[in-house]
Amino acid sequence: MLLTAIIIVLREVLEIALLTSLLASVGKYIGIRFHHFALALLSGITFAYLYAKNLPTISELFDYTGQEWINSILQITIYVSLACFIILLCSNPHRMNNLKRLMMCLMLMPIVLALTREGSEIYIYIDSFFHGNRPVFPVVVGSIIGSCIGLSIGALIYYALISCPLEKRLTIVKCALAVTACGILSQAVSLLLQADVLHSYPALWNSSEYLAEDSAIGQLLYAILGYEATPAPQQVIVYVVGLLLIISGVVIHKYYGSKRAIDV
């Protein structure tokens, strides 16, 4: 039970820690300070608590698929915010300074929404042990250990990134955010499949033999890359399309940005 708690909480915390560390590493470049991230984290924790407390009512919506609907909307919103942020991050410093407020919203919104979703799941998981006859102590200890590991990994990623030259750091962050955003979008499709909103088809492949989804590494890859051992065709299509949209947006933005600079 201790190991299970560590893995479950680590998976949830790692996704938030990874996202926050990537965005925070370019925060100073954009002009966003530490207290902005602290406010986003505090808001996310508050919303996570409110979401978890109202989950029984939310779950009854849309023929008892309310949780899947809300979570998928949160995931899609995170993808859109990250995609727009990646595209604007390719702007020249002068134009980026004019878009500071917009970029701040696009940077902090994914943190708030991700913490709302993942934090509510952690709260529900731990709270379920307090209302049952199962032992609570191993779960609490495991949750603390999992949280500490996840936060430590996030801190290591952050300090590793800020030690890189700015140009290299921006490239790494944009690539990592694109992969993370597409993984989150794929998770949204998975939720819609669970709610029978989308028609289910046989999985394109099954990699469980090589890397089980419920293994420690599998769950960590799920948090980081959205890994699934048996992905549905819609998930793979959406992942690829989401990645192509980001790449296209970056190319178009750079083209018109350079054209505007030449005209000026």
Image (cartoon, rainbow, N blue to C red):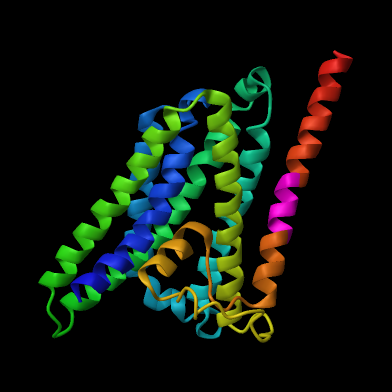
Question: 38 and 229: which one is in front?
Answer: 229
Residue sticking out furthest to the top: 264
Q: Please tell me whether residue 242 belongs to the stretch shown in magenta.
A: yes
Residue 113, given in percent of the width and then of the height, sits at 47, 54
Asked if one can make out residue 119 in the rendered structure from this viewpoint, the answer is no
Residue 91, given in percent of the width and then of the height, sits at 68, 27
Q: Please tell me whether residue 160 belongs to the stretch shown in magenta.
A: no
**Residue positioned 64% across, 80% down in the render:** 197
Question: 258 and 77: which one is in front?
Answer: 258
**Residue positioned 49% across, 75% down in the render:** 210
**Residue positioned 55% across, 53% down in the render:** 180
Residue 182, given in percent of the width and then of the height, sits at 61, 57
**Residue positioned 70% across, 47% down in the render:** 246
| Relative to 215, 174 lies left or right | right
The relative height of residue 259 versus residue 181 in the rendered view (above or below) is above
Residue 24 occupies which quadrant of the picture? top left
Main secondary-structure element of the magenta-colored stretch: helix
| Relative to 28, 247 lies left or right | right
Question: 239 and 119: which one is in front?
Answer: 239
The relative height of residue 8 versus residue 48 in the rendered view (above or below) is below
Q: Magenta span covers which residues?
A: 241-247
Residue 4 occupies which quadrant of the picture? bottom left
Residue sticking out furthest to the right: 263
| Relative to 119, 98 lies left or right | right
Residue 63 occupies which quadrant of the picture? bottom right
| Image quadrant containing the C terminus | top right
The relative height of residue 236 versus residue 79 in the rendered view (above or below) is below
| Image quadrant containing the N terminus | bottom left
